[in-house]
Image (cartoon, grey):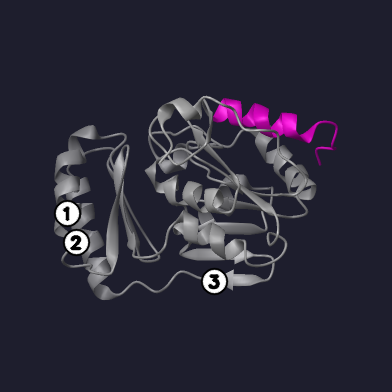
Amino acid sequence: MESESTLAAEPPLIEDDWALFLDVDGSLAEHAPTPDAVRIDPAIKQALPALSRKCGGALALVSGRSVEALDALFDPVHIAAVAGLHGLERRWHAGWNPAPEMDAGFLALAAEAEAIAARFPGALIECRGGCLFLHWRAAPDAAPELGAFAESARTRLPRHRLHPGAHGIEIRPVGMDKGAAIAAFMQAPPFQGRRPAFIGDDPADEPGFAQVNALDGVSVLIGAARTSAARHRLANPGAVRRWLLDSLHDEVLA
């Protein structure tokens, strides 16, 4: 991984030959106590269609949220290419890959997590498409018990892996991450043959940084400097907003 000292440089402005991949929570928008409380700056919503045109349609959201949740968050703006649930479900210009069905054993495990979270007001469990998200941003006292639960889930979900975050843990299938989602997009038009760029803010975004670095792309950490594979950094979503708008120059926002 790159060292913290290499993360001081801001990224270059977006070029017409890029493929632009955007994390949402913590990158395009500030984190909030719950996912439902997150809001997208209207200026960013307005800029995304223009950025997509600038990049020949090669713009995608790459998020832990579901595609349905992302569509609602960005409404009325429609983003054609979206990787939801870290790529477990993916919509792009040529088709749709849905998330797999959840079996009874997985749903029973999710119910156990919800029973633990119910004892900690503000803790949140999300069960979507074979992924289980344990959130304790608004209930830090839940971290020990939910963390222990996640560790115990390892033996019951051998085809899943734990992915710790700053305020929660994601339990998701092996082999699916944001790097794999970006790689899949890059294999087909309009992304194919372009220089990839990816912005993200937390450990779940590191596979995305590694993937774009392998393709001589632009990797951008959002937030405080830390050890990361990213080669550039922007301080916060406000800085991301300025970068996106500066990259448009005189292009029409519509």
Circle count: 3
Q: Position of residue 243 (x, y in %)?
A: 66, 30
Look at the numbered disc 1 and give the secondary structure of its residue: helix
**Amino acid found under the numbered disc labelled 1:** Glu
Which quadrant of the view contains residue 112?
Answer: bottom left
Look at the numbered disc 2 and give the secondary structure of its residue: loop
Q: Earlier in the sequence, mark 3 or mark 2?
A: 3
Q: Is residue 79 magenta?
A: no
Q: Position of residue 124 (x, y in %)?
A: 30, 46
Which quadrant of the view contains residue 102?
Answer: bottom left
Q: Quadrant of the N terminus?
A: top left
**Amino acid found under the numbered disc labelled 2:** Arg
Q: Check if mark 2's residue and mark 1's residue have beta carbons within 8 Å.
A: yes
The majority secondary structure of the magenta stretch comes to helix
Q: Is residue 67 visible?
A: no
Front tag of 3 and 2: 2
* 251 relative to 66, above or below: above
On the image, numbered disc 1 is attached to which residue?
151
Please give the range of residues in magenta.
Answer: 237-254
Q: Nearer the viewer, residue 245 or 186?
A: 186
Look at the numbered disc 3 and give the secondary structure of its residue: strand
Q: Position of residue 103 (x, y in %)?
A: 30, 75
Q: Nearer the viewer, residue 33 or 149?
A: 149
Q: Position of residue 69 (x, y in %)?
A: 51, 53
How far is the residue under mark 2 from the one under mark 1? Answer: 6 Å
Where residue 154 is drawn, which disc sits there?
2
Residue in view at x 49 percent, y 32 percent: 30
On the image, numbered disc 3 is attached to which residue?
97
**Amino acid found under the numbered disc labelled 3:** Asn
Where residue 133 is drawn, which disc sits there?
none
Residue in view at x 74 percent, y 46 percent: 49
Residue in view at x 74 percent, y 34 percent: 247
